[in-house]
Amino acid sequence: MANESITIYKLIILYTLSKVNTALPPGIISDYITGHGYTNYFTLQNAFGELLEAELIVEDTTYHVSYYQITDTGKETLSLFGQPLSQDIRKEINEYLTEHKYEIINETSLISDYHLTSEGSYLASCILREGNHILFRVDLDAATEEDAIKICENWQNASETLYRQAIQGLLP
C-alpha cells in the first residue's frame, strides 16, 4: 500500500506541474498535498527526490528557493501511467491552481540569484518573467556576497519601478 501511495503523490506532482506554464516552488505543491491530507512533508520530499532521480522533473535552485518543472519524459510518463489519478483529484488540483493563481504568479514571476565570478566578485541576476518568458533581466556585479544578497532580496520590491523606468527610458 505504501508503494501505491507514493505513486499517487508522484502523479499529483507530475499532474500539477503539467498544468502550469512555469516552474513551481515546492511550497505550492506541498500546500496542496499536505493541505488536503494526502501525506506529510517528509513523504512528499521522498516523492520529489524519486521524480528528480528518474528525471521526470528538473530542479532549478536559486540562493534561497528551488523550482520544479516537469520534463518531456515526465509528461510522457503521466500520459501513459496517470490513470490511477482520479478525476476528483484532478479536479481538486485544477481548482487549487485556479484559486491560488495570483499567489503562484507572485511566487514565480520574480526570480533572483547570485554566483561568484571568476574575478572574485558576485553577479546578482534579477529576472521578471511571465510564465517561462523573460520580460526583464538585470545582472549586477556586486563586490561582496552580502551586497549580492541585498540586491536579490530587494528585487521583490524594486522590480516594478525598475522595469517601468527602463521601458520609459528606452521607449521615450
Image (cartoon, rainbow, N blue to C red):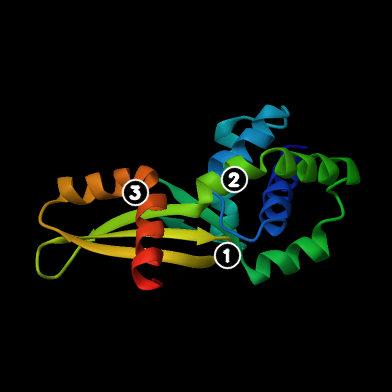
Return the residue nearer the eye: 13 or 5.
Answer: 13
The residue drawn where x is 62% and y is 43% is 102
Locate residue 126, reporting x and y percent: 35, 58
Residue under the point 36% across and 72% down: 170
Q: Count residues near mark 2 (Cα–Cα under 10 Å), then give few for <14, some for 14-19, many for 20+.
A: some
Mark 3 and mark 2: span between their CA atoms? 17 Å
Q: Give whichever of 170, 54 is nearer the camera.
A: 170
Image coords of residue 42 (percent x, y): 55, 34
Which label sits on residue 155? 3
The image quadrant that residue 139 belongs to is bottom left
Q: Residue 8, labelled with which disc?
A: none
The residues bearing labels 1 and 3 have C-alpha atoms spaced at a distance of 31 Å
Find disc 1 in the rendering and name its residue: 55
Labels 1, 2: front one: 2
At label 3, the amino acid type is Trp
Q: Where, by quadrant of the figure, is residue 143 drawn?
A: bottom left
Q: Position of residue 74 (x, y in %)?
A: 67, 64
Task: Identify the disc placed on residue 104.
Answer: 2
Within-10-Å neighbours for mark 3: few <14, some 14–19, many 20+: many
Residues at marks 1 and 2, CA–CA distance in whole angstroms? 24 Å
Q: Residue at x 56, y 57 (%)?
A: 23
Q: From the viewer's perspective, is the residue at label 3 or at label 2 nearer? A: 3
Q: Residue furthest front?
A: 172
Residue appearing at x 48%, y 65% in the figure: 135
On the rendered structure, is 70 left or right of 79? left
The amino acid type found where label 2 is placed reads Ile
Evaluate if marks 1 and 3 touch, with contact meaning CB atoms under 8 Å apart. no
